């Protein structure tokens, strides 16, 4: 059982939530698409429920709310250093089922994969997750194949129409916050996708020497190494470190954690002029096998959640789905071209 807010009541609800949380949801950024006359859908702070985009998939995932593209992790002088103060307000993120599953992958990597990441943990513990339903599948989504079309690790479920906002909280803090709000008791079914146009079957095993198959040679010619597929992916977590020195005091500055990509040139450079995965075919191989094979061998489930964003964003129209299907066609001891 949840709460049904009429439009006027929903304004008061958002104001009440905004007193406690910075609220992030997919919204339109005018003129910030690939070209000057195109828009981009990405996560930003909303000031109205009408800001939320429901009928389109966000071009970028929620992850930059928890893991900013450039994140200052400490300030330093010649004598001391200081960790940035935490945000004064908590966060609330509206996201879909596939992205909730992506959050499980981020938690695995940053919280249970050895030492906990202090910055991610601090942000994660102060974040509420609000599930947005999907009435139908978007282009290039294959969440059903990946088993990520349904999720239960959310703090509340939200649903909207032209006249009202429905919110069903699971989290006790949110239930307490909603006490006394003007609303009606109501119950709705959660909208889940049950079928995608795109379907894939992930092979359980791959033959030895898969890294040397001709399959990857195609991508050595086509991929330009821009890294966009990594940046839109909700489960990619690679970063680099940058020290920035202030112009007015060269002995003081800040250290930043900045997104990086396994697809860009120089990512695997090491001391001694050593570099692994020098061509784009090898980099494509690493990314794809990590998403649907290597990660599962270690953690028991695939890293990829089937959101299809990498499929949408590639400027060279490289199809991740087609690559996965080629893997599925490979038989033990066979050749990728067979």
Image (cartoon, rainbow, N blue to C red):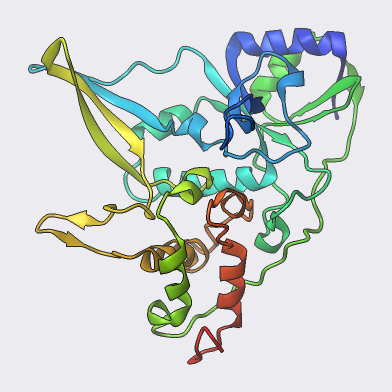
Looking at the image, which residue is at 75% across and 48% down?
A: 138
Question: Measured from the top left, where is residue 292 in percent x and y?
Answer: 52, 65
- Quarter of the image for residue 165 reads top right
Question: Measured from the top left, where is residue 10 in percent x and y?
Answer: 80, 13
Quarter of the image with the N terminus is: top right
**276 above or below 15?**
below
Residue 145 horizontal side relative to residue 62, left or right? right
Looking at the image, which residue is at 8% across and 16% down?
A: 79
Q: Nearer the viewer, residue 278 or 102?
A: 278
Looking at the image, which residue is at 57% across and 57% down?
A: 317
Quarter of the image with the C terminus is: bottom right
**199 above or below 264?**
below
Residue 4 horizontal side relative to residue 269, left or right? right
**255 above or below 309?**
above
**243 above or below 288?**
above
- Quarter of the image for residue 168 reads top right
Question: Measured from the top left, where is residue 300 in percent x and y?
Answer: 52, 64
Q: Nearer the viewer, residue 301 or 30?
A: 30
Q: Farthest residue toward the bottom?
A: 333
Total of numbered circles in the picture?
Answer: 0
Q: Nearer the viewer, residue 277 or 38?
A: 38
Res 178 seen here: yes
Residue 161 horizontal side relative to residue 289, left or right? right
Question: Measured from the top left, where is residue 160 in percent x and y?
Answer: 83, 27
Looking at the image, which residue is at 73% across and 36% down?
A: 132
Residue 160 horizontal side relative to residue 123, left or right? right
Res 182 seen here: no
């Amino acid at each position: 059982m949840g709460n049904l807010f009429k439009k006027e009541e929903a304004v008061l609800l958002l104001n009440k939530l905004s007193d406690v949380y910075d609220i992030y949801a997919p919204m339109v950024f005018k003129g910030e698409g690939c070209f000057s006359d195109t828009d981009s859908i990405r996560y930003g702070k909303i000031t109205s429920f009408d800001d939320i985009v429901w009928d389109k998939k966000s071009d970028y995932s929620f992850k930059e709310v928890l893991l900013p593209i450039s994140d200052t992790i400490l300030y330093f002088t010649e004598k001391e250093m200081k960790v940035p103060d935490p945000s004064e307000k908590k966060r609330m993120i509206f996201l879909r089922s596939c992205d909730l599953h992506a959050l499980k992958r981020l938690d695995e990597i940053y919280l249970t994969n050895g030492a906990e990441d202090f910055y991610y943990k601090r942000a994660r513990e102060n974040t509420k997750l609000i599930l947005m339903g999907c009435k139908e599948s978007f282009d290039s989504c294959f969440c059903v194949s990946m088993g990520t079309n349904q999720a239960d690790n959310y703090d509340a479920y939200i649903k909207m129409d032209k006249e009202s906002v429905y919110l069903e909280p699971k989290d006790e803090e949110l239930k307490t916050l909603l006490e006394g709000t003007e609303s009606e008791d109501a119950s709705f079914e959660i909208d889940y996708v049950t079928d995608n146009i795109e379907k894939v079957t992930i092979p359980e095993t791959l033959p030895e020497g898969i890294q040397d198959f001709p399959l990857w040679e195609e991508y050595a010619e086509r991929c330009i190494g821009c890294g966009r597929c990594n940046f839109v992916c909700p489960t990619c977590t690679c970063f680099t470190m940058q020290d920035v020195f202030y112009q007015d005091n060269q002995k003081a500055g800040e250290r930043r954690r900045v997104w990086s990509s396994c697809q860009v040139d120089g990512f695997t450079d090491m001391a001694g002029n050593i570099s692994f995965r020098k061509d784009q075919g090898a980099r494509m191989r690493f990314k794809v096998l990590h998403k649907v094979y290597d990660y599962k061998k270690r953690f028991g489930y695939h890293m990829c959640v089937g959101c299809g964003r990498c499929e949408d964003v590639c400027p060279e129209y490289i199809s991740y789905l087609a690559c996965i299907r080629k893997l599925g066609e490979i038989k033990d001891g066979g050749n990728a071209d067979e």
